[in-house]
Image: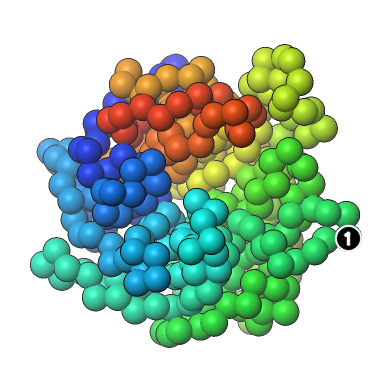
């Protein structure tokens, strides 16, 4: 069975940049819209009805006063129905947003969100998961940390569900850091991004730039027992994206980059290969396969248009098409431009 994608939804103009996704208690799909390609559109969360697939604005995410915008990326529901959100103020690299990232708790009632700031001062909060009373957050960039070999350092943080106003210092001395990572790809110095727990409680974390999938195991007290690479791209990270023939070689690689990830009931992990316009699958044994890959597209035929995050929903794999990184500064990406309207793709699973 070919895993050719179809269009799940063509998104309204108020969601030009879809990213993180989660499923609510009624089975509806919630999508975060940071709207980086057009921040005149207030960042919001949209809801897609489980039965009708109707798309509606669920709530506008309250902006940060200092920047005037919100930047919701990763999202995850807690056990009480509150939604935890990575407000990645630093994503666009503006001076105003530097070290202003937050982890938010949104209590949403009647289309309005009451906000609690769980953590603040983060450089680049990206992905989030909730498990057993804790919030796990990836921070993809930590520019304050100077690695001896010049590599980018990133980390997974762990906060308590009831934490409020935690000040993050963006160095490795932060007591909230669960594990740190280095990205050796000098042409794509972007660290850990997607994360997910398997059925056994192991935490899997994707290193975006290196195309490495890490597995973190825990002891009985919840401390890290091990942090190992269980799957890794076959891409040659020494290749220069500005050299002729780069994309021809790069797009032959499996799982070149790892953005969002999710897991199925058999502990297979699905990976959004952002740079290659592809979806990969990693088995529990660490075997990588590419479920679907396509060239540059506008997404209107269901094609992957810079996939940001996958999620299993109603027995199929839904993918958000981020479609916001392109141009001469990003020659390593298959994507060449932003296309509107934005779309969500859906793939059958084989």
Task: Please give the name of the residue rendered at 74% of the width and 54% of the height, measured from the top-left corner.
Answer: 152
The residue nearer to you, when weighing 314 against 322, is 322
Q: Position of residue 309 (x, y in %)?
A: 45, 43
Q: Is residue 101 above or below residue 223?
A: above
Q: Is residue 41 left or right of residue 124?
A: left
The residue beneath circle 1 is: 148
The residue nearer to you, when weighing 92 against 136, is 92
The residue nearer to you, when weighing 24 against 154, is 154
Q: Position of residue 172 (x, y in %)?
A: 73, 73
Task: Please give the name of the residue rendered at 78% of the width and 34% of the height, measured from the top-left corner.
Answer: 237
- The figure's colour scheme reads rainbow
Q: Is residue 33 above or below residue 88?
A: above
The N terminus lies in which quarter of the figure? Answer: top left
The C terminus lies in which quarter of the figure? Answer: top left
Q: Is residue 7 above or below residue 233?
A: above
Give the structural element (helix, strand or loop) at label 1.
loop
Q: Position of residue 322 (x, y in %)?
A: 42, 38
The residue nearer to you, when weighing 226 against 41, is 41
* Image-quadrant location for residue 185: top right
Q: Position of residue 115 (x, y in %)?
A: 30, 75
Task: Please give the name of the residue rendered at 37% of the width and 22% of the height, measured from the top-left corner.
Answer: 298
Residue 205 visible in rendering:
no
Count of marks placed on residues: 1
Q: Is residue 330 left or right of residue 29?
A: right
Few, some or many residues within 10 Å of mark 1 (<14, 14–19, 20+): few
Q: Is residue 103 above or below residue 200?
A: below
Residue 130 visible in rendering:
yes
Task: Please give the name of the residue rendered at 42% of the width and 63% of the height, measured from the top-left corner.
Answer: 87
């Amino acid at each position: 069975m070919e895993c050719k994608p179809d269009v799940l939804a063509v998104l309204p103009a108020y969601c030009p940049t879809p990213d993180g996704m989660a499923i609510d208690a009624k089975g509806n799909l919630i999508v975060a819209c940071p709207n980086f390609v057009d921040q005149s559109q207030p960042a919001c969360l949209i809801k897609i009805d489980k039965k009708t697939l109707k798309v509606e604005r669920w709530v506008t995410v309250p902006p940060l006063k200092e920047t005037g915008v919100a930047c919701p990326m990763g999202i995850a529901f807690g056990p009480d129905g509150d939604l935890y959100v990575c407000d990645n103020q630093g994503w666009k690299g503006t001076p105003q947003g530097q070290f202003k990232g937050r982890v938010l708790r949104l209590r949403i009632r009647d289309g309005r969100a009451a906000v609690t700031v769980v953590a603040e001062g983060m450089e680049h909060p990206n992905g989030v998961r909730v498990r057993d009373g804790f919030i796990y957050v990836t921070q993809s960039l930590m520019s304050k940390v100077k690695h001896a070999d010049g590599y980018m350092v990133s980390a997974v943080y762990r906060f308590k569900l009831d934490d409020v106003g935690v000040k993050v210092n963006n160095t490795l001395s932060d007591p909230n850091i669960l594990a740190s990572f280095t990205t050796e790809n000098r042409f794509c110095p972007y660290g850990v991004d997607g994360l997910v727990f398997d059925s056994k409680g192991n935490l899997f974390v994707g290193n975006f730039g290196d195309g490495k999938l890490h597995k973190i195991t825990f002891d009985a007290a919840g401390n890290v027992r091990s942090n190992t690479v269980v799957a890794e791209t076959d891409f040659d990270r020494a290749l220069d994206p500005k050299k002729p023939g780069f994309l021809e070689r790069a797009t032959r690689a499996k799982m070149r980059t790892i953005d969002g990830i999710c897991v199925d009931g058999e502990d297979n992990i699905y990976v959004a290969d952002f740079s290659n316009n592809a979806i990969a699958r990693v088995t529990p044994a660490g075997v990588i396969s590419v479920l679907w890959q396509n060239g540059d597209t506008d997404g209107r035929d269901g094609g992957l248009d810079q996939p940001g995050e996958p999620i299993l929903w109603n027995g199929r794999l839904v993918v958000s098409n981020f479609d916001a990184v392109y141009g001469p500064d990003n020659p390593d990406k298959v994507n060449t431009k932003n296309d509107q309207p934005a779309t969500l793709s859906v793939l059958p699973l084989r």
